[in-house]
Image (cartoon, rainbow, N blue to C red):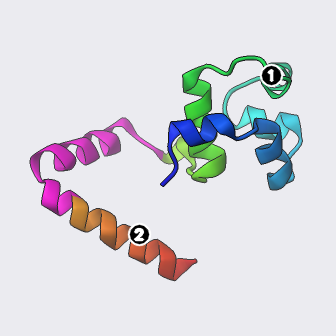
């Protein structure tokens, strides 16, 4: 399970290089300019929202253009109101993803 603390230890430059992307490709997917991304890669403190976007887009491989607020609201509702259903769905989704890989 990936956590924010884990992503803080990972070098954004290293993630970008492993993905084979140039700075423009890598950072524009997060809405960050190439020059801003370059500063983060050089050691400038990365704000938490940018760090989270990096994790979602480049580590978790989530296409954030397809995520809708309504989807997140549904997930939060099920998680709060039907925790056992949420756990079951989460387990099923993980198993499905493993089989697809």
Q: Residue at x 54, y 42 (%)?
A: 64
Q: Is 82 drawn above or below residue 96 in the view shown?
A: above
> Which residue is label 2 attached to?
94
Q: Residue furthest bottom?
A: 99
- Residue 19 in percent (x, y) is at 80, 53
Q: Which residue does the image show at 85% across and 34% down from the upper left?
A: 24
Quadrant where the C terminus lies?
Answer: bottom right
Residue in view at x 50 percent, y 47 percent: 66
**Residue 91 drawn above or below residue 50:** below
Query: For residue 43, which numbered disc appears in the image?
Result: 1
Residue 72 appears in which quarter of the rendering? top left
Residue farthest to the left, as pictured: 81
Placement of 81 over or under 91, stated as above or below: above
What predominant SS class does the magenta segment belong to? helix
- SS state under label 2: helix
Where in the figure is residue 8, as x and y percent of width and height?
63, 34
Out of 34 and 69, give the one closest to the viewer: 34
Q: Which numbered disc, 1 or 2, marks the residue that appears first in the sequence?
A: 1
Q: Is residue 65 above or below residue 33?
A: below
Return the x and y of residue 74 as percentages of the image width and height: 24, 45
- Separation (CA) of disc 1 from disc 2: 35 Å
Image quarter of residue 30: top right
Determine crowd level at label 1: few under 14, some 14-19, many 20+ residues with C-alpha closer than 10 A: few
Q: Residue at x 11, y 53 (%)?
A: 82
| Residue 48 falls in image quadrant | top right
Q: Nearer the viewer, residue 37 or 64?
A: 37
Residue 85 drawn in magenta: yes
> Would residue 32 be found to the left or right of residue 5 on screen?
right
Question: What's the magenta region?
Answer: 67-86
């Amino acid at each position: 399970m990936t956590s924010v603390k884990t992503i803080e230890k990972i070098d954004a430059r290293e993630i970008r290089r492993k993905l084979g992307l140039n700075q423009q490709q890598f950072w524009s997917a997060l809405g960050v300019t190439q020059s801003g991304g370059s500063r983060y890669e050089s050691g400038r403190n990365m704000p938490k929202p940018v760090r989270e976007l990096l994790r979602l887009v480049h580590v978790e491989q989530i296409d954030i253009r397809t995520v809708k607020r309504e989807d997140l609201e549904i997930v939060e509702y099920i998680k709060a109101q039907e925790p056992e259903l949420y756990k079951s769905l989460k387990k099923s989704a993980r198993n499905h993803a493993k089989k697809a890989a």
